[in-house]
């Protein structure tokens, strides 16, 4: 009861909380819809990726010549390029382009940022939500850019632990704020579909800096807000 009323008192005045926008960035990749969004790819590289997927189809005992699979190698190659397009973007540059001088010095939190990534061990998806907070020290950044940083790092082969730290470090490096906190909650298809097959297991990782480490009240406030 106590913590709830404290939260209600503080939220409107002291803390800027933003639920991320739904990520409607055209992630329909079932056919050729993502053509315009994939990075430029050298035709030679695209050709060798397509060949490799053709070989993989043979390797699993399929017939790459049957009708349903004729375009699959090229489609999978394009899909992979889309899902890993974060290699071609620089998250720190992206943040630098949206930094403003501002005296606001309370916590800024963007929670429930949709996240889709692929584990580097199995190249299978993991997905969930990221919560990103920072305490400005003279500089703020456009809120949508925090979600973009999550996206850019997610669109690479990852482990969840490193992804969490990379997001923290990029924000720390560019804004030099009084503290950064990142929590990611995700489900890994390599655990759900194979291996231990724990359908509901959720992996949580966190990375923090500055006041989120040194100040227990700040840390508790953040953790309370992302649960709400
Ligand atoms: Zn994995």
Image: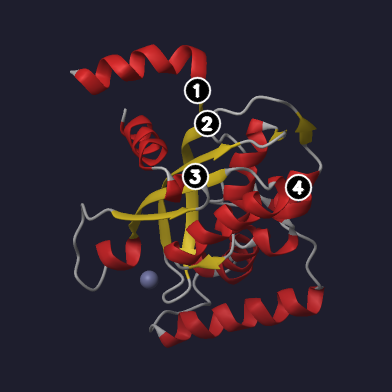
Residue shown at 77% from the left, 37% from the top: 98
Q: Are the residues at dot 4 and dot 3 in contact (C-beta closer than 8 Å)? A: no
Upstream in sequence: badge 4 or badge 3: 4
Q: Are the residues at dot 2 and dot 3 in contact (C-beta closer than 8 Å)? A: no
Disc 1 residue crowd, few under 14, some 14–19, many 20+, Cα 10 Å: some
**Residue identified by numbered label 3:** 211
Q: From the image, state whether disc 3 or disc 1 is nearer to you.
A: 3
Q: Are the residues at dot 2 and dot 1 in contact (C-beta closer than 8 Å)? A: yes
Residue 88 position in % (x across, y down): 74, 62
Q: Are the residues at dot 2 and dot 4 in contact (C-beta closer than 8 Å)? A: no
Examine the image and state in which quarter residue 139 appears. top right
Q: Tell me the tag on residue 15.
A: 1
Q: Quadrant of the C terminus?
A: top left
Q: Please say which color scheme the image uses.
A: secondary structure
Ligand 1's image quarter is: bottom left
Q: CA distance from mark 1 to mark 4?
A: 24 Å
**Residue identified by numbered label 2:** 107
**Residue identified by numbered label 4:** 94
Upstream in sequence: badge 2 or badge 1: 1
Upstream in sequence: badge 2 or badge 3: 2
Residue shown at 63% from the left, 43% from the top: 177
Examine the image and state in which quarter residue 54 appears. bottom right
In the structure shown, which secondary structural element does the residue marked by tag 3 occupy?
A: helix
Q: From the image, state whether disc 1 or disc 4 is nearer to you.
A: 1
Examine the image and state in which quarter residue 197 appears. bottom left
In this rendering, position of residue 222 left or right of residue 36: left
Residue 24 position in % (x across, y down): 57, 34
Q: CA distance from mark 2 to mark 4?
A: 21 Å
Residue 122 position in % (x across, y down): 41, 75
Q: From the image, state whether disc 2 or disc 3 is nearer to you.
A: 3
């Amino acid at each position: 009861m106590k913590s709830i009323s404290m939260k209600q008192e503080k939220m409107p005045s002291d803390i800027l909380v933003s639920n991320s926008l739904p990520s409607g960035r055209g992630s329909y990749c079932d056919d050729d819809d993502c053509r315009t969004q994939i990075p430029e790819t050298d035709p030679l590289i695209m050709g060798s990726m397509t060949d490799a997927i053709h070989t993989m189809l043979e390797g699993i005992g399929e017939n790459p010549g049957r009708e349903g699979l004729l375009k699959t190698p090229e489609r999978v190659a394009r899909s992979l390029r889309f899902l890993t397009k974060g290699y071609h973007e620089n998250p720190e540059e992206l943040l630098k382009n949206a930094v403003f001088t501002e005296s606001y010095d309370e916590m800024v939190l963007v929670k429930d940022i949709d996240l889709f990534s692929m584990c580097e061990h199995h190249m299978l998806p993991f997905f969930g939500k990221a919560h990103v907070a920072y305490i400005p020290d003279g500089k703020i950044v456009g809120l949508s850019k925090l979600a973009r940083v999550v996206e850019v790092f997610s669109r690479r082969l990852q482990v969840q632990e490193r992804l969490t730290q990379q997001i923290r470090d990029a924000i720390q490096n560019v804004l030099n704020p009084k503290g950064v906190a990142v929590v990611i909650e995700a489900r890994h298809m390599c655990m759900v579909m194979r291996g231990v097959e724990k359908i509901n297991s959720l992996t949580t990782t966190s990375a923090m800096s500055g006041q989120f480490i040194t100040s227990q009240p700040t840390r508790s406030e953040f953790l309370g807000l992302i649960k709400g």
